[in-house]
């Protein structure tokens, strides 16, 4: 049985851990407000961009000059999985849930005889995926040095993806990230971004437009921009999801530490009481013997 001194050390250590998790919870809550505001502000622009491109794409449907980002390469053999995760842990299942979705997609494609490549954005996803798919990871981007996410970060990722697409390294690109719903709900999401998927059930415009320049030329300019916009939205959604998951995880850790302190204190008090009782019995027994 542990001594009273050891028990006091354990209780003090658990209390110190509780203070750390509580502080991390408060920091995550503070950063979550800004991250959530940024993610919610990016959604209308990204949705409107998709709607505009869908409208133009419907007008250019069947055109032989349609950009490859819309029409595709004509093949479905090589898939690039753009997996966006966090740079840090202590956030519950946030990182692992995104990686799990990407891994399931990769294994399903490989079972169909397709070739799979990974582009990892974020340290945690890279560390998990390289255990199983080390040779298939073609690029890894670390954003630990970025204090505040900006559109330039998404543009950099989009340029790297487009360069590989133009070089014929893949046919389909799917973006993986976590969509922020609330502090306790983050939804792992897979979104095909190359070739662009146009919603078939989107309401068709009843107005006829004439485009200047032609639809194909407009799409050639808009599609790369849209790619960066969708990646930027994913990064912002991920950022908000990370802080929401971390806040929830640290809250649970703080509660667990409190429960552990209560149990350790109870054991300490019982042990101390038993020791005092034993000493009293020894004193009384010695007095009676005299």
Image (cartoon, rainbow, N blue to C red):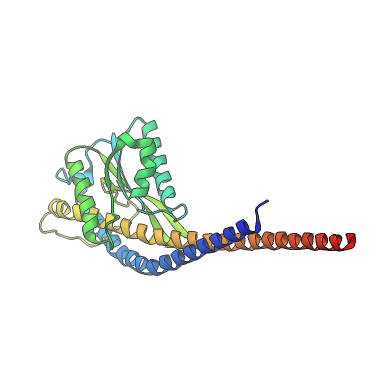
Res 265 quadrant in image: bottom right
In the orientation shown, which residue stands out farthest toward the left? 213
Return the residue nearer the eye: 199 or 16.
16
The total of numbered circles placed on residues is 0
Say which quarter of the image contains residue 104: top left
Q: x, y percentage for residue 68?
A: 19, 44
* Residue drawn at (28%, 60%) of the image: 46
Can the viewer see residue 104?
Answer: yes
Residue 223 shows up from this direction: no
* Image coordinates for residue 41, horizontal then vertical, percent: 31, 67
Q: Is residue 161 left or right of residue 281?
A: left
Displayed quadrant of residue 33: bottom left
Q: In which quarter of the image is the C terminus?
A: bottom right
The picture places residue 227, in percent across and down from the top left corner, at 24, 53
Q: Between 84 and 147, which is closer to the camera in this rendering?
A: 147
Q: In this view, does 283 lie to the left or right of 126?
A: right
Instruction: Name the residue at 62% across, 59% down.
Output: 5
Q: Which residue lies furthest to the top in this view?
A: 113
Instruction: State the image coordinates of residue 155 (x, y, percent, origin top left).
Output: 21, 55
> Which of the two residues, 91 or 240, is positioned nearer the viewer here?
91
Q: Residue at x 41, y 51 (%)?
A: 95
């Amino acid at each position: 049985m542990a001594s009273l001194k050891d028990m006091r050390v354990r209780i003090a250590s658990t209390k110190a851990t509780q203070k750390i998790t509580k502080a991390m919870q408060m920091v995550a809550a503070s950063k979550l407000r800004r991250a959530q505001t940024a993610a919610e502000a990016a959604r209308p622009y990204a949705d409107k961009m998709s709607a505009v491109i869908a409208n133009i794409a419907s007008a250019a449907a069947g055109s032989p000059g349609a950009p490859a980002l819309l029409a595709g390469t004509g093949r479905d053999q090589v898939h690039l999985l753009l997996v966006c995760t966090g740079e840090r842990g202590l956030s519950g299942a946030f990182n692992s849930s995104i990686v799990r979705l990407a891994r399931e997609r990769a294994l399903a494609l490989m079972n169909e005889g397709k070739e799979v490549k990974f582009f990892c954005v974020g340290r945690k996803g890279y560390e998990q995926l390289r255990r199983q798919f080390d040779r298939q990871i073609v690029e890894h981007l670390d954003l630990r040095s970025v204090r505040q996410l900006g559109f330039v970060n998404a543009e950099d990722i989009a340029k790297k993806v487009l360069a590989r697409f133009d070089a014929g390294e893949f046919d389909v690109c799917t973006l993986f990230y976590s969509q922020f719903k609330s502090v306790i709900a983050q939804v792992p999401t897979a979104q095909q971004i190359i070739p662009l998927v146009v919603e078939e059930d989107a309401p068709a415009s009843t107005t006829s437009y004439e485009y200047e320049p032609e639809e194909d030329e407009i799409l050639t300019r808009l599609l790369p921009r849209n790619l960066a916009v969708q990646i930027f939205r994913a990064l912002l959604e991920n950022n908000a999801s990370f802080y929401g998951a971390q806040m929830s995880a640290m809250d649970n850790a703080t509660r667990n530490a409190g429960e552990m302190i209560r149990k350790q204190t109870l054991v300490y008090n019982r042990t101390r009481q038993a020791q005092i009782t034993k000493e009293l019995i020894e004193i009384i027994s010695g007095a009676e013997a005299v």
